[in-house]
């Protein structure tokens, strides 16, 4: 991975307008981690979502679910189905129930 990253970066240096090299330099770049301070409300919402999953896992197995503070907002066969029902999923916990 490190060799591929270095080659991609060098390629962008030599050919700064080459779209494919820029794409791979971006893909191979190290991950960026952002730390977001938590709050008691956010922690409580996570706990409520986990409790919902524990209680309803069997009923929704194989389905995608969207939860907000332990409340089911939507379920569907795919993420696309959730987006069609809800629009923006920002701030909503969504996952496939396994």
Image (cartoon, rainbow, N blue to C red):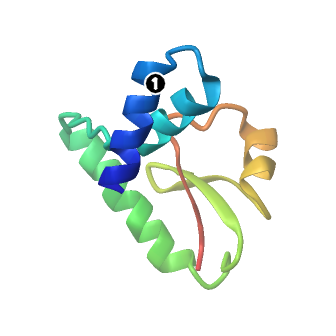
The residue at 38%/59% (across/down) is 48
- Front one among 88 and 27: 27
- Front one among 64 and 56: 64
- Left of 38 or right of it: where is 85? right
Q: Quadrant of residue 36?
A: top left
Q: Quadrant of the N terminus?
A: bottom left
Q: Position of residue 71 (x, y in %)?
A: 54, 54
Q: Is residue 91 visible?
A: no
Q: Is residue 2 visible?
A: yes
- Left of 87 or right of it: where is 3? left
**Which type of secondary structure does the marked residue at label 1 adopt?**
helix
| Residue occupying the far front of the picture | 14
Q: Position of residue 56 (x, y in %)?
A: 57, 76
Residue linked to disc 1: 12
Q: Quadrant of residue 88?
A: top right
| Residue occupying the far bottom of the picture | 58
Q: Is residue 91 above or below residue 64?
A: above
- Left of 35 or right of it: where is 87? right
The residue at 30%/52% (across/down) is 2
Q: Is residue 85 above or below residue 77?
A: above
Q: Position of residue 29 (x, y in %)?
A: 37, 39
């Amino acid at each position: 991975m490190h060799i591929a990253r270095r080659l991609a970066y060098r390629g962008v240096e030599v050919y700064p307008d080459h779209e494919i090299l820029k794409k791979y330099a971006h893909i191979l770049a190290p991950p960026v981690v952002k730390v977001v301070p938590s709050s008691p409300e956010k922690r409580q919402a996570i706990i409520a979502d986990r409790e919902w999953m524990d209680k309803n896992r069997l009923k929704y197995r194989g389905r995608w679910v969207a939860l907000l503070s332990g409340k089911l907002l939507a379920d569907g066969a795919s993420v696309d189905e959730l987006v069609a029902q809800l629009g923006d999923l920002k701030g909503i916990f969504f996952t496939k129930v396994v």
